[in-house]
Image (tube, rainbow, N blue to C red):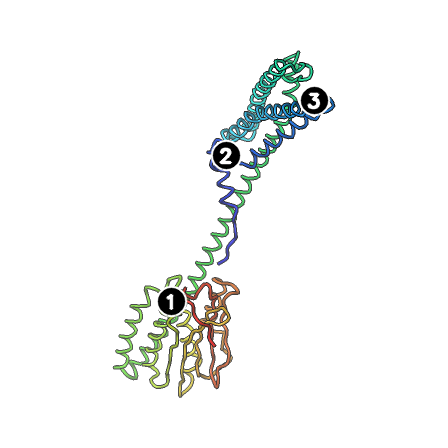
């Protein structure tokens, strides 16, 4: 079947639906949290590097670095939660969503910066208690709280705007990708159903073709041997009693198709008498292999119609199945008149080729070749992995 591979659709849809954090924090992944933490670490290192010239002890520098990182996290946490929650809660128009996002960003960053300055002021107070000069630990509000707050809000606000922009862009891209994958999946499903409908139509063409031919044979036999016609009609009724429940099935087994074909050949032998001989040689291990319905019967019918029926002496049909080169090969060989102008161009063979191509592409094929000393061998080759049963089958010698 034609199909389109869409491996990321479930992953994207799962992330958009909220993943394990719930719908309120959908899109907040471990990767994004790690990225925010990394930004805080880099910002802390930047602020610490400014004071490298002050020749502070290593322990003091490490304390300042930890303080700056913690302060950055204090700002990042409320901003991240506010941005993510607002994006997921406000689902109206784009203008409304971005307005709500700007308001949430302003409020959360103000709260975060104020909390950060309080935290750093507390650390500065502890430094004074520890006899570290206030000028050497100049963090927190400082001498002008309002100016310190304004400077920090502007500085951190720019980082927060950058974060919000990146988050919104990624979420928009995720939604677009999910919609595209959904559309691609629906298109693939539509193509698959279309192919299934076309294959069923091709398969349905075989049923009236076979039925009309068989009934014509019964009528002809009634004109020549009425007793045999009654027996043939009884066999035909038993045949359809078994065959009809499976004729429109999408799959069948090689054993079932062989039984139906054997019943068909037995019916034809009533009409042809000694002019028709047949043998079916299919190993027991292969009888449970999956096999497309009605194809084997079509090959047998084609062998009689084009190979044996035109000859006064008739001939023999031999059906066999082997595993060759990792393929299941089912052959119908006849000893009829061989290739003629119409060989390989009939409706039945064209139907088989179309069904094989539609279902398996280049992995399956129908081939015709000369039989020895006379006749035609028609072979259907199917992928072994798709059609042989679990029981290993030894390859044909």
Who comes first in sequence, dot 3 or dot 1? 3
* Most distant residue in the top direction: 143
> Residue, x 50% and y 43% (percent of image)?
11
Q: Residues within 10 Å of mark 2 (few under 14, many from 20)?
A: many
Quarter occupied by residue 168: top right
Callout 1: helix, strand or loop?
A: loop
278 or 343: nearer the viewer = 278
* Residue 179 image label: none
Q: Label for residue 26?
A: 2
x, y percentage for residue 202? 44, 64
In terms of depth relative to the viewer, which is nearer, 254 or 366? 254
Left or right, 217 with respect to 44, comes to: left
Would you identify the image quadrant in which residue 200 lies?
bottom left
Question: Crowding at label 3, few (<14), some or many (≥20) Cα neighbours within 10 Å?
Answer: few
User: Secondary structure beneath disc 3?
Assistant: loop
Instruction: Give how far apart the Cα atoms at labels 2 and 1 are.
Output: 49 Å
Task: Please name the residue that numbered disc 3 is placed on.
Answer: 56
Q: In the image as oriented, which residue stretches furthest toward the right? A: 53
């Amino acid at each position: 079947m034609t199909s389109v591979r869409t491996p990321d659709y479930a992953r994207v849809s799962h992330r958009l639906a909220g993943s394990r954090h719930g719908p309120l924090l959908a899109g907040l992944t471990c990767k994004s949290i790690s990225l925010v933490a990394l930004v805080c670490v880099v910002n802390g290192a930047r602020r610490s590097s400014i004071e490298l010239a002050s020749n502070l002890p290593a322990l003091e520098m490490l304390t300042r670095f930890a303080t700056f990182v913690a302060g950055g996290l204090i700002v990042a946490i409320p901003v991240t939660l506010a941005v993510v929650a607002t994006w997921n809660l406000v689902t109206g128009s784009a203008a409304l969503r971005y307005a709500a996002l700007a308001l949430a960003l302003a409020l959360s960053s103000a709260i975060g910066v104020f909390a950060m300055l309080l935290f750093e002021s507390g650390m500065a107070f502890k430094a004074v208690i520890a006899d570290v000069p206030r000028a050497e630990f100049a963090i927190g509000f400082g001498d002008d709280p309002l100016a310190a707050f304004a400077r920090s809000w502007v500085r951190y606000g720019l980082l927060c705007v950058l974060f919000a922009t990146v988050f919104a862009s990624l979420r928009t891209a995720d939604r677009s990708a999910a919609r595209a994958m959904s559309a691609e999946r629906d298109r693939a499903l539509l193509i698959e159903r279309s192919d299934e409908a076309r294959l069923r139509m091709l398969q349905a063409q075989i049923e009236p073709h076979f039925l009309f031919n068989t009934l014509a044979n019964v009528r002809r036999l009634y004109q020549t041997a009425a007793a045999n016609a009654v027996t043939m009609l009884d066999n035909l009724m038993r045949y359809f009693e078994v065959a009809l429940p499976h004729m429109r099935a999408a799959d069948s087994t090689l054993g079932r198709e062989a039984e139906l074909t054997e019943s068909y050949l037995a019916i034809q032998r009533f009409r042809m008498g000694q002019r028709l001989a047949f043998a079916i040689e299919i190993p027991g291990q292969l009888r449970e292999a999956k096999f497309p319905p009605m194809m084997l019967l079509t090959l047998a019918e084609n062998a009689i119609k084009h190979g044996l029926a035109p000859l006064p002496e008739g001939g023999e049909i031999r059906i066999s199945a082997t595993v060759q080169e990792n393929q299941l090969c089912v052959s119908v060989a006849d000893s009829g008149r061989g290739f003629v102008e119409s060989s390989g161009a009939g409706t039945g063979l064209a139907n088989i080729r179309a069904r094989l191509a539609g279902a398996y592409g280049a992995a399956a094929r129908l081939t015709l070749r000369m039989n020895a000393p006379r006749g035609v061998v028609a072979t259907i080759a199917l992928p072994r992995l798709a059609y042989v049963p679990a029981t290993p089958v030894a390859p044909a010698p």
